[in-house]
């Protein structure tokens, strides 16, 4: 419960950056456990499609971990699309998922997420 509260607080802190539309913590089952959209931001997809996307993001990170022993641990995964920039940052067995405007810097988002979430030892620098 305390961890969920700290996740929620950290998500709200990261949402203060103007380029960011959404910050969420996704658990290993693909469920959103903390965070959400910035006020007055409309999601691009309905709730069912977002849930499918969360599961896909968790699966992608999980599959990429198969190469950790040779390539090193995943620091983050960024995907730039026409309408959004998606950044996934693994933390333990969960994922920080950020959606931002396409022109945002993925590196800057990761730096800010690390700064905010590292206060509780949830994420290490990449």
Image (tube, helix red, strand yellow):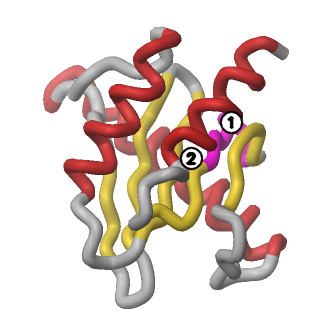
Question: Is the N terminus in the top left, top right, bottom left or bottom right quadrant?
Answer: top right
Q: Quadrant of residue 5?
A: top right
Question: In the rendering, at what x and y percent does residue 81 appear?
Answer: 36, 82
Q: Tell me the quarter of the image containing the C terminus.
A: top left
Give the residue at x 58% y 60%: 22
Location of residue 33 by image quarter: top right
Where is mark 2, residue-wise? 58
Please tell me the numbered disc located at residue 53: none
- Report the residue at 49% width, 17% height from top: 122
Q: CA distance from mark 1 to mark 2?
A: 8 Å
Residue 47 position (above or below residue 58)? below
The image shows residue 6, relative to residue 75, as above or below, that is above
User: In the image shown, does 100 or 76 lie closer to the viewer?
Assistant: 100
**Tally of numbered tags:** 2
Q: Are marks 1 and 2 in contact (CB under 8 Å)?
A: yes
In the rendered image, which quarter is residue 119 located in? top left
Q: Position of residue 2 (x, y in %)?
A: 78, 12
Tell me, yes or no, whether the highlighted magenta stretch contains residue 26: yes
* Secondary structure of residue under mark 1: loop
Residue at the spot 82% in from the left edge and 72% down from the top edge: 48
Compared across the picture, whether 31 is left or right of 81 comes to right
Q: Which residues are magenta?
A: 24-30
First in sequence: mark 1 vs mark 2: 1
Left or right: where does residue 23 sit relative to residue 49? left
**Mark 1: few/some/many CA within 10 Å (<14, 14-19, 20+):** some
Q: Residue furthest left?
A: 71
Q: Is residue 16 above or below residue 20?
A: above
Q: Residue at x 49, y 44 (%)?
A: 14
Side (left or right) of 61 relative to 104: right
Residue matched to label 1: 27
Q: Residue 19 at x, y = what percent?
A: 40, 66
Using a 10 Å C-alpha cutoff, classify the residue at mark 2 as few (fewer than 14 neighbours), some (14 to 19) or many (20 or more): many
């Amino acid at each position: 419960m305390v961890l969920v509260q700290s996740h929620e607080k950290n998500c709200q802190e990261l949402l203060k950056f103007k380029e960011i539309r959404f910050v969420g913590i996704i658990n290993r089952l693909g469920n959103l456990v903390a965070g959400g959209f910035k006020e007055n931001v409309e999601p691009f997809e309905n709730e069912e499609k977002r849930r499918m996307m969360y599961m896909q993001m968790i699966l992608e990170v999980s599959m990429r971990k198969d190469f950790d022993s040779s390539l090193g641990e995943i620091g983050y995964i960024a995907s730039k699309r026409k309408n959004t920039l998606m950044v996934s940052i693994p933390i333990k067995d969960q994922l920080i998922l950020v959606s931002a405007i396409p022109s945002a810097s993925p590196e800057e988002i990761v730096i800010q997420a690390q700064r905010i979430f590292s206060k509780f030892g949830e994420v290490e620098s990449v």
